[in-house]
């Protein structure tokens, strides 16, 4: 199974976490050099395109500004990231130069990917870099990011980049060997899960028991990233980035780390953007008939099936659809603003123009802009 998955990989996203890149509260430059060498091997020997999502900006800046511990307040963290990001990319540049590989720094916020035009622009820029045989090194723009536009952690960012670039595989390098039933750093009897076909509550519960040693995400955020990519038809591997030749061993299909199997059906790029990148601006509650039409028949949402609207939003906004029991069933982009949806809810499509004085569409949310929540 691993051989089959690896044989199809032509583009991979590699995410490396702070637990791998940090050593004695400083950047692990030896690891950076080794990682660069392995990525060069993938590009030059295996003809695989690589996008690197890298943490480590704060670790790179701590000692440079003379601090002996991580600060608690956000302005200091952002200032340290500003100092450390330049050092981080410089170390990567030096490391990749040793094997004749060029790199580029790309800093993003959630806001960059939530706007469709900027989302596509970011994708075009990354495609151009790959076309020029340049490795994009991507990080969250910690210096300016605020809570409202923050990915949360680079696990989430790596999943979004995987979707953005239609990658064939996401590799998440951490400081343990993969997903275990409990934290292997404190439990000698912890058992590794080599293969996960379905991410259920048992798997999520096991992940909650394994916190991050240095980074913000921990194992739980890696499992959430795995859910995002596998649901959309892309496999993911969690492996130990401290193990020498880890990328080579993965691409030789060795049994290393935890492999998360993807769904057979792949989501379209646009539906992945709706499902995993956008934040809901409101809630539309639907009746049982509309619920069946959406979930079982793959139909659009019509005004007749709407029984409640919460929030204030405009045309094209992402909203969550719930059933009458307040259970989320789908996410989609609306064709009308919230004020007009309240006026038309419960109406047949032929009555829309008479009530509003205009009609853009029969559908409140077209099925092409609607993604089921599983």
Image: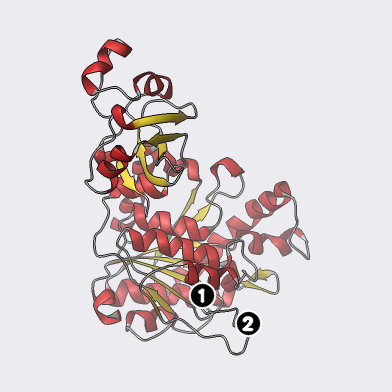
For image coordinates 35% across by 30% down, the residue present is 306
In the image, residue 313 above or below residue 8: above
SS for callout 1: helix
Place of residue 43 in the rendered image (x, y in percent of width and height, measured from the top left): 32, 71
In the image, residue 152 above or below residue 310: below
For image coordinates 34% across by 42% down, the residue present is 120
**Pointer 2 or 1: first along the chain:** 1
Place of residue 28 in the rendered image (x, y in percent of width and height, measured from the top left): 61, 73
Determine whether, in the image, residue 275 is placed left or right of residue 22.
Answer: left
- Residue 52 appears anywhere in the view: no
- Please tell me which residue lies in front, 16 or 313: 313
Q: Quadrant of the N terminus?
A: bottom left
Which mark, by number, is residue 33? 1
In the image, residue 308 above or below residue 280: above
Determine whether, in the image, residue 36 is placed left or right of residue 350.
Answer: right
Q: Quadrant of the C terminus?
A: bottom left
How is the structure coloured here? secondary structure
* Residue at the far bottom in the pictured view: 189
Real-space Cα separation, disc 2 to disc 1, in angstroms? 26 Å
Determine whether, in the image, residue 25 is placed left or right of residue 190.
Answer: right
For image coordinates 37% across by 23% down, the residue present is 341
Q: Quadrant of residue 86?
A: bottom right
- Please tell me which residue lies in front, 363 or 257: 363
Place of residue 175 in the rendered image (x, y in percent of width and height, measured from the top left): 56, 76
Q: Which residue is mark 2?
A: 185
Within 10 Å of the Cα at label 1, are there few (<14), some (14-19), or many (20+) other Cα atoms? some
């Amino acid at each position: 199974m691993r051989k089959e998955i690896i044989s199809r990989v032509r583009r991979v996203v590699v995410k490396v976490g702070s637990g791998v890149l940090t050593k004695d509260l400083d950047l692990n430059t030896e690891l950076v050099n080794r990682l660069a060498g392995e990525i060069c091997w993938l590009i030059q020997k295996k003809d695989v395109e690589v996008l690197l999502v890298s943490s480590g900006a704060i670790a790179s800046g701590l000692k440079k500004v003379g601090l002996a511990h991580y600060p608690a307040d956000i302005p200091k963290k952002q200032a340290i990231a500003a100092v450390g990001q330049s050092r981080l990319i410089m170390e990567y540049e030096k490391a990749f130069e040793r094997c004749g590989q060029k790199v580029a720094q790309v800093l993003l916020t959630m806001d960059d990917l939530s706007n469709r035009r900027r989302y596509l622009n970011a994708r075009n820029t990354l495609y151009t870099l790959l076309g020029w045989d340049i490795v994009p090194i991507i990080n969250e723009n910690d210096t300016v990011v605020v809570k409202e536009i923050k990915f949360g952690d680079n696990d989430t960012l790596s999943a979004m980049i995987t979707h953005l670039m239609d990658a064939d595989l996401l590799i998440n390098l951490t400081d343990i060997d993969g997903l275990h039933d409990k934290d292997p750093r404190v439990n000698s009897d912890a058992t590794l899960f080599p293969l996960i076909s379905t991410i259920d509550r048992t798997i999520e519960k096991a992940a909650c028991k394994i916190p991050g040693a240095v980074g913000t995400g921990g194992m739980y955020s890696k499992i959430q990233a795995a859910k995002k990519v596998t649901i959309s038809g892309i496999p993911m591997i969690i492996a130990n980035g401290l193990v020498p030749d880890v990328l080579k061993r993965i691409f030789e299909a060795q049994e290393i780390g935890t492999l998360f199997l993807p769904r057979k059906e792949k989501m379209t790029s646009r539906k992945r953007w709706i499902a995993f990148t956008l934040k809901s601006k409101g809630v539309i509650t639907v009746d049982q008939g509309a619920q069946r039409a959406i979930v079982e028949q793959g139909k659009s949402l019509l005004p007749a099936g709407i029984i409640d609207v919460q929030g204030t939003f405009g045309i094209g906004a992402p909203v969550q659809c719930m059933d009458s029991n307040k259970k989320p069933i789908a996410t989609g982009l609306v064709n009308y603003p919230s004020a007009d949806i309240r006026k038309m809810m419960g109406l047949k499509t032929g009555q829309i123009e008479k009530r509003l004085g205009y009609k853009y569409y029969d559908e409140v949310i077209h099925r092409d802009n609607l993604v089921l929540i599983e």
